[in-house]
Image (cartoon, coloured by chain):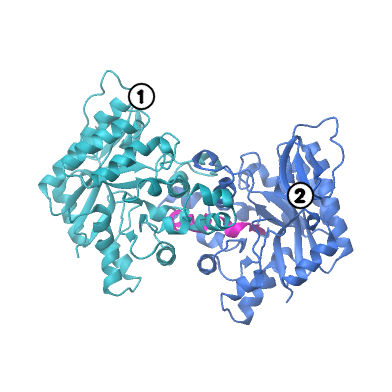
Chain colours: A cyan, B blue
């Protein structure tokens, strides 16, 4: 069983000029005197990064060092561009998807593609999804919210209907999270405190919004172990069990929660043990956030701390990811 | 060791007339033809309730049935009145605190008091706190946010300084939570999905806001097991360990988290086992939400599922609560 990392990101080495239609947050790359690159959104420096974001040789060498056989490549989430017009987001998306397609073509046994689509226009997102399917992508990455709307909102049904029909995996990643007004201290705390919360709300929305009831063959995964959702689920289940209105509104939440996939990017082995109990050992796979600062180093050794036997260990290392991505197709 | 329930609520059987100064959300009680009472805020029916909210004999009989020796009585959180002028909130607070004082006087071996103070004016809150201390209260209940500000905001330092000085316990309860725009489905889901999130942010704010660094003898507890906080802590710790700016801003978060108290109102024994690992068996105590719908029935049996030996079991049943409330004074 190959070891598969479903949570890692790419950024193109450069970007096309901003089109006339766009806009204050168009991406670009600035080369610094020290040789590092800075990805910009409009005039704002967003993140310092290096060639690991786009260089296949460097990336596969790093994968070899950490025993990763396959990466499912997805765009750095800030590229998702939901805050632009849908047409401008398509332009950014095709550029990012183009890089992913090239990387997969250069090393088809090491990479699979999770592209991006303009979720602010679900019909257009469905159309772009079809093109990605034709180009051999395994699925897409979407945000934990789209301009404040959680993915379980029925607004997105046309997209999920097409994802189900095309057998495209959907990886939901934390993005522009809720509750930044609740944070005291340095702004970078938002990354640590609010990302998991937004992801938790995304999971909840797809349960209470009946996404899998409407699209039963859809495969959906959540970043960061589903964020805060496992901490909320028992309370949601208690409420559901005691309330007829909720029972009519959506299916029993614990069962639905165990049909989603979750990565293990949670930095704590006791929490991972708990998530295995909550979601089941068939639903959790490896994710690292490579090549960014928050990445889980030595991800296989991290999993090994669980001390699991072969069938479960293989499932977590790669089997569950292969099922989520449907690599057998 | 007596069994102590720190999370339960009272509501006065009636309220004084709205003062001329106040305001669209003044509380009142409406008696329904079926004999039930409805607590109103302005013209809005908030909750159907019964005499368990104020009747000492009925309450102690229920406590006997469920092996609870002592309840720490706190107001129904919607009474906290942070959205009124501070003076009007003082009027509501003195009325609610008056009921708590009467109940404690009627059954001093069964009840201790957790009152309420106008946190929207921390200096005035400190003054009211002093009166509660003189009246024999063990502490106060405050909201997980005060008009959107989390309790770790330095705005509240004058209050916490006085709580530390007066040896008054502070029980932080979920209230008017963040992220209601992230919920898909019936509005009542906010109670289940958003309460834990707001409590989680409250815990985080008191770590990143250095509350215990400024007031080291302060005793603070959080409702609902700290909500989502345990799910966020490993990510916060990872961020802190890798970042000098955060290390300068506040102390190591795991250690601080293990100085707070948390109730066990989480409805799931596996989650409770996990919280015991995260926070330590000296920091968690029993809470039931009596007499409301979301209450944990048979709370002692729930704890017994842990299968703990005498010293730890006694700590969870009452020892930790007695330490939080400083019942020995």
**Residue A78's x, y, as percent?**
34, 38
* Labels 1 and 2 positioned on one and the same chain: no
Instruction: Pick the residue in front: A86 or B81.
Output: A86
**Residue at mark 2:** B116
Quarter where residue B291 is shown: bottom right
**Residue B19's x, y, as percent?**
85, 34
Residue under mark 1: which chain is it in? A
Instruction: Pick the residue in front: B32 or B134.
Output: B32
Q: Is residue A100 visible?
A: yes
The kind of secondary structure element at disc 2 is: loop
Q: Residue at x 26, y 67 (%)?
A: A314
The kind of secondary structure element at disc 1 is: loop
**Residue at mark 1:** A24
Q: Residue at x 76, y 44 (%)?
A: B39
Q: Residue at x 25, y 21 (%)?
A: A19
Magenta-tinted stretch: B220-237
Is the residue B61 above or below the residue B156 in the image?
Answer: below
């Amino acid at each position: 069983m190959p070891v598969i990392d479903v949570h890692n990101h790419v950024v193109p080495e450069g970007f096309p000029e901003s089109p006339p239609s766009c806009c204050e947050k168009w991406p670009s790359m600035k080369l610094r005197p020290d040789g590092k690159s800075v990805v910009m959104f409009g005039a704002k420096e967003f993140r310092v990064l290096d060639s690991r974001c786009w260089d296949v040789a460097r990336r596969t060498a790093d994968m070899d060092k950490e025993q990763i056989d396959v990466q499912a490549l997805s765009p750095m989430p800030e590229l998702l561009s939901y805050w632009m017009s849908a047409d401008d987001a398509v332009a950014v998306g095709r550029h990012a998807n183009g890089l992913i397609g090239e990387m997969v073509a250069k090393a088809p046994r090491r990479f699979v593609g999770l592209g991006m689509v303009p979720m602010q226009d679900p019909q257009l997102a469905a159309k772009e999804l079809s093109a990605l399917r034709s180009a051999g992508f395994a699925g897409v990455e979407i945000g934990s919210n789209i301009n404040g709307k959680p993915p379980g909102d029925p607004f997105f049904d046309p997209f999920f209907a097409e994802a189900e029909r095309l057998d495209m995996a959907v990886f939901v990643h934390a993005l522009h999270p809720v509750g930044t007004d609740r944070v005291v201290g340095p702004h970078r705390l938002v990354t640590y405190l609010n990302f998991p919360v937004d992801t938790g709300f995304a999971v909840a929305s797809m349960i209470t919004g009946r996404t899998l009831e409407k699209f039963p063959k859809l495969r959906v995964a959540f970043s960061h172990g589903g964020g805060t959702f496992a901490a909320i689920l028992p309370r949601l289940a208690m409420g559901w069990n005691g309330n007829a209105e909720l029972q009519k509104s959506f299916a029993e939440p614990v069962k639905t929660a165990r049909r989603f996939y979750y990565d293990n990017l949670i930095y704590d082995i006791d929490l991972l043990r708990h998530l295995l109990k909550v979601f089941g050992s068939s639903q959790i796979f490896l994710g690292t956030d490579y090549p960014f600062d928050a990445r889980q180093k030595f991800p296989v050794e991290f999993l090994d701390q669980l001390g699991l036997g072969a069938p479960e260990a293989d499932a977590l290392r790669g089997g569950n990811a292969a099922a989520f991505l449907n690599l057998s197709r």
